[in-house]
Amino acid sequence: MKTKGNDSGSSVNVEKKVAETIKRYKLLKKTDKVVVALSGGKDSTSVIYILKKMGYNVEGLMIDLYLGQWSEVHKVNMTKFCKENNIPLTIVDLKKELGQGICFIKAVLKKQKNLTGCTVCGIIKKWILNKWAKEMGADKIVTGHNLDDEAQNVLMNFLKGNILLGVNSGPSAGGKSVAGFAQRIKPLFFISENDIRAYAKKMKFEILYDKCPCSFETYRADTRDWLDNISDKEKLAIVENFQKEVLKLRKENVVELKTCKSCGEPSRSDTCNYCKVVCNI
Ligand code: SF4
Ligand SMILES: [Zn+2]
């Protein structure tokens, strides 16, 4: 493993916490083929590095969203990082997949369907990730979602008056999985953004810390700003308390995943969000 830093001596041992989460929730087996969704940021870079160091069979999967220089720098960084750490990397070209970059698609959907924020991008990324991970023969898909992301989700769903939107949340996605599709897991689920940033800096990963130039999700940004006023310990309490409720909610609200009738990818309803939102634009 090639880095210029090490994790010893940090106030929160991120590597130890990842190992504990994997063990406690039985997230991975050593025989699993693990595809990690790489954005090029601190979270996904840290998680793929730690999993590789722990001896898991990891591969990186990155989507080139065509976000100008930001995407270009991320691609260069991840290509170098994966090469140095002997990790196979696949980069999916959004223009080859969908004919356009993400900004154009977002602009069209805003005009046609009044869809704003990161929702559209999130749906597209999830769909591409599922499709490519299946082609790569993945047993598990790892994402870099952290404690702050999860605390934001809990609060946003609560404020929307629909906590059931989070019924599948957890270090491993709940609901019955569809045969042939890899399960999504989040080894950084209980680790705060502050701790991951400190880890990535300590390890001297050559990455960008800038925010995505196309991120205009004001509702999430407002929730994030509010959460910035509370401690990591309080964010952990929000997420852990909700996880206790999730177990009860799942029993009463079984979410059976189906395959989308149009594209064959996993979906909660007969037609997946991607086909509902992105197709026919
Ligand atoms: S911040 Fe929003 S627009 Fe940017 S990559 Fe993430 S989901 Fe897409
Ligand atoms: Zn579909």
Image (cartoon, rainbow, N blue to C red):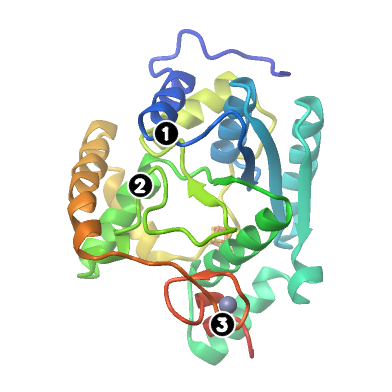
Q: Amino acid at mark 1?
A: Lys
How many neighbours does mark 2 have within 10 angstroms: few (below 14), some (14-19), or many (20 or more)? many
Q: Is residue 59 above or below residue 61?
A: above
How many neighbours does mark 3 have within 10 angstroms: few (below 14), some (14-19), or many (20 or more)? some
Please say if the residues under marks 1 and 3 sit with CB atoms less than 8 Å apart. no
Q: Residue furthest front?
A: 179
Q: Amino acid at mark 2?
A: Gly
Q: Residue 84 at what x, y percent from top left? A: 80, 26
49 and 249: which is toward the camera: 249
The image quadrant where one finds ligand 1 is bottom right
Say which mark, if any, is on residue 261.
3
Q: Would residue 96 be found to the left or right of residue 257 on screen? A: right
Q: Residue 100 at what x, y percent from top left? A: 75, 75
Disc 1 from disc 3: Cα separation: 32 Å
Snapshot quadrant of residue 158:
bottom left
Q: Earlier in the sequence, mark 2 or mark 3?
A: 2
